[in-house]
Image (cartoon, helix red, strand yellow):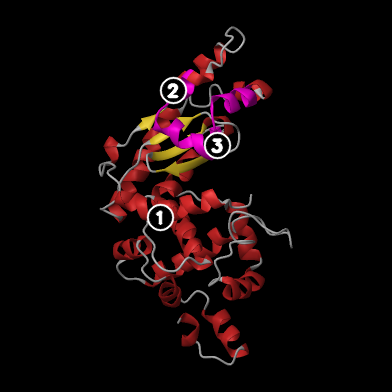
Amino acid sequence: MKLSLATALFIIFSNFLFAQNNFSDNPSNAVFETKDSKNFWEAFAKMDKSKQNPFVEYMQNGSPGVKGFTENRIINADSLFAVVKKRKADYEASKHVLDGISSKEKRVRAIYSALKYWYPKAKFPPVYFVYGRFNSGGTTSPDGIIIGIEMLKNLDGVAPLIAHELIHYQQNILGKDMLLKWCLLEGGADFIGELVSGESINQFSYQYGEQNKEQLCPEFVTRLKNPDYQDWLYGTSKKDDRPNDLGYWIGYKIIESFFNKQKDKQKAIEEILHIQDPMQFLKESGFLDVYIEKYQKSKKESFDAFFK
């Protein structure tokens, strides 16, 4: 979907906030909060009996996850009630999706511990499982990671999703707001998330990226300094058959190339999380060198001039 202004501002806000929070630095102390599921089903059971909106209480008694999911997603109790009435059967299908959450919690704590090895300064946000309006599978907020339960068919993809979002809380990437910066933000979360979880996400866009690398990389070279996200992040113009979020793939490839060149891998992770100059980082990675050289020759400019 197309990136809204609110979402763009949130990403910008989160990039500078999450690395400076007061979350626990001990994986064993990380919080997994599921009480909102119980509250939701208590409200759900009152739907046909109460003359009042039973989801008012769900909202009022909600965890910080519900509050973080309210703006732009739940909106308010009336909006939630309207969707639940319309899609009652769809909600009922998710009633037992959290039954195996204890095993996933153990898996996620193992991921947290892996990140602690790679990045000893890591902070670990709470994970909130909440019910929304079928418009978001999850997000991050200053209070923690929020997962939309109703969007889940099972818990198979929860661990790598949490791993990706976990990395965003560690990142503080500086530099001008341009496509390259945000691709490094998302690609970095994918790369380190995969490193600590052993699982990857966005597999379809990655497969497409690899198959169409010779067309996509030259295009990206012409676009990477532009703040326009279209066709690379959060939505496409439908000009071709590309999937959403190819920026995750190309950011991952740049990050991977940089990481593979470094002798001190733990230091490399810290540098990836705290990129000071995206253009210089790109140059050090060497991933797009061939395409940049060709582009610069067409403009009759030097290779080094591209990075200024």
Q: Residue at x 64, y 73 (%)?
A: 214
Main SS class of the magenta portion in the image: helix
Location of residue 51 (image quadrant):
top right
Location of residue 22 (image quadrant):
top left
Tag 1, which secondary structure?
Answer: helix
Given residues 202 and 180, the one toward you in this image is 180
Mark 3 packing: few (<14 Cα in 10 Å), some, or many (20+)?
some
Q: Which residue is mark 1?
A: 15
Asked if residue 174 can be seen in this view, the reply is: yes
Q: Which residue is mark 2?
A: 60
Of discs 2 and 1, which sits in the foreground?
2
Q: Residue at x 51, y 40 (%)?
A: 138
Among numbered discs 1 and 3, the one appearing first in the sequence: 1
Q: Amino acid at mark 3?
A: Arg
Tag 3, which secondary structure?
Answer: helix
Residue 149 drawn above or below residue 229: above
Mark 3–mark 2 distance (CA, rounded to whole Å)? 16 Å
Q: Amino acid at mark 1?
A: Asn
Q: Which residue is mark 3?
A: 73
Q: What x and y, as percent, mark residue 57?
A: 47, 18
Q: Amino acid at mark 2?
A: Gln
Kindly check if marks 1 and 3 are in contact, taking CB atoms under 8 A apart as contact.
no
Q: Does 62 lie within the magenta span? A: yes
> In the image, which residues are magenta?
57-84
Among numbered discs 2 and 1, the one appearing first in the sequence: 1
Among numbered discs 3 and 2, the one appearing first in the sequence: 2
Kindly check if marks 2 and 1 are in contact, taking CB atoms under 8 A apart as contact.
no
Q: Does 219 lie within the magenta span? A: no
Mark 1–mark 3 distance (CA, rounded to whole Å)? 21 Å
Q: What x and y, as percent, mark residue 303?
A: 50, 87
Residue 88 drawn above or below residue 144: above
Instruction: Report the side of 253 relative to 166 (left or right).
Output: right
